[in-house]
Amino acid sequence: MPALADAHCHLDRHHFAEGPDAVMRRAFDVGVVGFVVVGLAGEGEGADESIAPAREAVGLARRMREHVTACVGLHPHEARLWSPELHERLRVLSGDPDVSAVGEIGLDYHYEHSPREAQRDAFARLVAVAREVRKPIVVHTRSAAADTLDLLEREGARDVGGIIHCFSEDRAFASRALDLGFDLSFSGIVTFKNAVAVQEVAAWAPLDRLLVETDSPYLAPVPLRGKKCEPALVVHTARRVAELRKMPLEDLCAAALANTEARFKRRFSRVLPRPD
Ligand SMILES: [Zn+2]
Ligand SMILES: [Zn+2]
């Protein structure tokens, strides 16, 4: 298999009880050499407990520096947890050398687990953090296309750029995002039969602006749709994108890997750790 990167995965223990090493091992075995691991603040007694899962992801990046980098943020689902104390911890953690982006942050009006106003507020504040630490932004957006783009524009996200993770919008959105300096990261959704608009964008997007990801443990690609997703499955997503673009899988993988490295300013080692 050609070398490849998973540009967005969640490897927390509450998703994978066996721990990240076993999960990454299976991905190494199919050629995945790089992982962007997402660390999100969550519920907790106080800001220190709340930030703990994000610190966990940074710890993994530090331990596996040759293959892993972290991004840290507050998911729009949890925007209601924002507080000045949590913000300060996220701000400091964002400056850590093993953190290469701020995110995922954004807006999710589909589930609306947090009030929209709280989502917009936390999103804007964390865009400001990304600008302060001069790192790219990993954006989550669902059923909130116009507000997401307007906010990114208004808050000067262009200064740092980033990626639209788990791209699930249309070509008009993609054009505006690309103009704002955001690359498009495709997840298993692009393999779903009914995801015609997303497939169209994957076929059309400039080759130097697209990434692939799993968003593990969610959204397993076809032919494993409905199963638990893990980074090893990013290969299926890459294969589908290559097919849509009528290009060899090797070339697509090489481009997506190079784009991931460029965007997150990391170089992943092609030499894989030996199994224990
Ligand atoms: Zn997301
Ligand atoms: Zn995610």
Image (cartoon, rainbow, N blue to C red):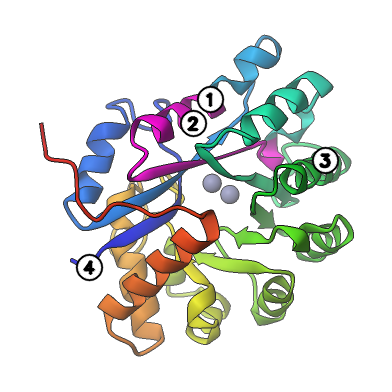
Q: Is residue 263 above or below residue 254?
A: above
Q: CA distance from mark 3 to mark 1?
A: 20 Å
Asked whether disc 1 touches disc 2, contact meaning CB atoms under 8 Å apart, the reply is: yes
Residues rendered magenta in the picture: 53-77
Q: Amino acid at mark 4?
A: Pro
Residue plotted at (11% across, 37% down):
275
| Between discs 4 and 3, the one toward the N terminus | 4
Would you identify the image quadrant in which residue 220 lies? Answer: bottom left
* Residue depicted at x 63% and y 44%: 103
Between disc 3 and disc 1, whose residue precedes?
A: 1
Q: Is residue 262 above or below residue 140?
A: below
Q: Residue at x 52, y 80 (%)?
A: 196
Q: Is residue 55 magenta?
A: yes
Q: Which residue is mark 2?
A: 58
Dot 1 amino acid type? Arg
Residue situated furthest bottom in the rendering: 246
Q: Position of residue 94 (x, y in %)?
A: 64, 35
Q: Measuring from the top left, give residue 7's x and y in whole percent.
A: 45, 55
Amino acid marked by disc 2:
Val
Query: Label 4 belongs to which residue?
Result: 2
Give the amino acid type for the residue marked by disc 3 in the picture. Arg
- For label 3, the residue is 125
**Where residue 162 sits in the image (x, y, percent)?**
63, 59
Q: Earlier in the sequence, mark 3 or mark 2?
A: 2
Query: Which image quadrant: the C terminus?
Result: top left
Per the image, label 4 sits on a secondary structure element best described as: loop
Q: Secondary structure at mark 2?
A: helix
Badge 1: residue crowd in 10 Å (few <14, some 14–19, many ≥20): many
Q: Residues within 10 Å of mark 2 (few under 14, many from 20)?
A: many
Residue nearest the viewer, comparing 185 with 169: 185
Give the crowd class for mark 4: few <14, some 14-19, many >=20 residues within 10 Å.
Answer: some
Q: Earlier in the sequence, mark 1 or mark 4?
A: 4
